[in-house]
Image (spheres, helix red, strand yellow):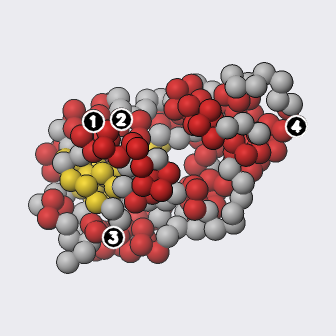
Amino acid sequence: MHNCLANKKAILFDLFHTLIAIESNINNRPMTHELLGVGKEEWRFQILQNAHDGITGKQTDPFKIIAGLVRNIDPDISDEVIERAVENRIALFADAIINVPDETMAVLRHLKSQGKKVALVSNADCWEVSAWARSPMAAFFDNVIFSCAAGVAKPDRRIYELSLNAIGIDADNAVFIGDGGSNELHGAQQVGLTTIMITGNIRSLWPEKIDERRRHADYVIERLGELIAV
C-alpha cells in the first residue's frame, strides 16, 4: 500500500479521470462534441466555464444544459442534433460507470479489506451519474456525494466537509485522490486533506495540464494500482 495511506483512516476519491474515464468507454461511442459538430477545445471550454448550474443541480434538464452550452458556440445548432447528443452522452457516461476497469475494482476491494473508509466526491450533472446504482463500484463506498445533489461543487470546501462529516473522519486522517480538474486538489488541501494526483488518464488527454495541477498534490501517481502496490 502507498506509504501515505498506511496511517490514514479514509480515502476520498474523485470519479471521472480518476476511477473511470469517459474517453475509454468500451462501446466506442462518439464524444459529445463530435455529434454536436463543434471543436473539442471549444466544447471543453464551455464544460469548464459555463456548466455550473448543471453540476450544482440548479438545472437538471439535460437538453437545456447541453443546448445552453453548445449554443454559446453555434446558436444555429438544431434541437434534433442536440437531442441525439444528449441521448449519446447519457449512454456514454453509463457505459463508463457500469463497465469499470479491473484495476479500479481491485483497488476498491483492497482498501475495504484493510478497513479503510471509502468515499466519493464528484462534480457531475445528475443525469451524468444516473447509472450509479448499477455500478459495481457502488457497493464499496461508505458515502457518495455528487455535486448536483449537494448543491455545491469542488473546489468549494463545503463539499469535502460534507463527505468527511458523513463518514465521521477528520481531514488529518483522510486522503483525497483525483486528477486535479476543477482545482479540486487545491480545495482539498485548503480543508487539510492530504492530496494524491493521478496522471494516467489526463496524460493522454491534456498533458499540458499536469504541471499546473501537480502544484497542489502532496503525492503523484500514474496509475490507480500504485495505491495498493507492495
Q: Secondary structure at mark 1?
A: helix
Q: Say which label, 2 or 4, has the lower sequence index.
A: 4
Residue 74 horizontal side relative to residue 93, left or right: right
For marks 2 and 4, give the CA distance: 34 Å
- Which residue is label 1 attached to? 186
Q: Are marks 2 and 4 in contact (CB under 8 Å)?
A: no
**Place of residue 47 in the rendered image (x, y in percent of width and height, measured from the top left):** 57, 33
Q: Residue at x 85, y 32 (%)?
A: 79
Q: Say which label, 1 or 4, has the lower sequence index.
A: 4
Q: Say which label, 1 or 3, has the lower sequence index.
A: 1
Residue 110 versus residue 84: which sits nearer the camera? 84
Is residue 91 at least partly visible in the picture?
A: no
Residue type, mark 4 in image: Glu
- Which residue is label 4 attached to? 80
- Which residue is label 3 attached to? 225
- Residue 131 position by quadrant: bottom right
For marks 2 and 3, give the CA distance: 23 Å
- Which residue is label 2 attached to? 183
For marks 1 and 2, give the CA distance: 6 Å
Residue 49 versus residue 98: which sits nearer the camera? 49
**Place of residue 230 in the rendered image (x, y in percent of width and height, measured from the top left):** 20, 78
Q: Residue at x 69, y 22 (%)?
A: 72
Residue type, mark 2 in image: Asn
Q: Are marks 2 and 3 in contact (CB under 8 Å)?
A: no
Q: Secondary structure at mark 4?
A: helix
Q: Say which label, 4 or 3, has the lower sequence index.
A: 4
Residue 81 versus residue 107: which sits nearer the camera? 81
Q: Is residue 160 above or below residue 229?
A: above
For marks 1 and 3, give the CA distance: 23 Å
Q: Are marks 1 and 2 in contact (CB under 8 Å)?
A: yes
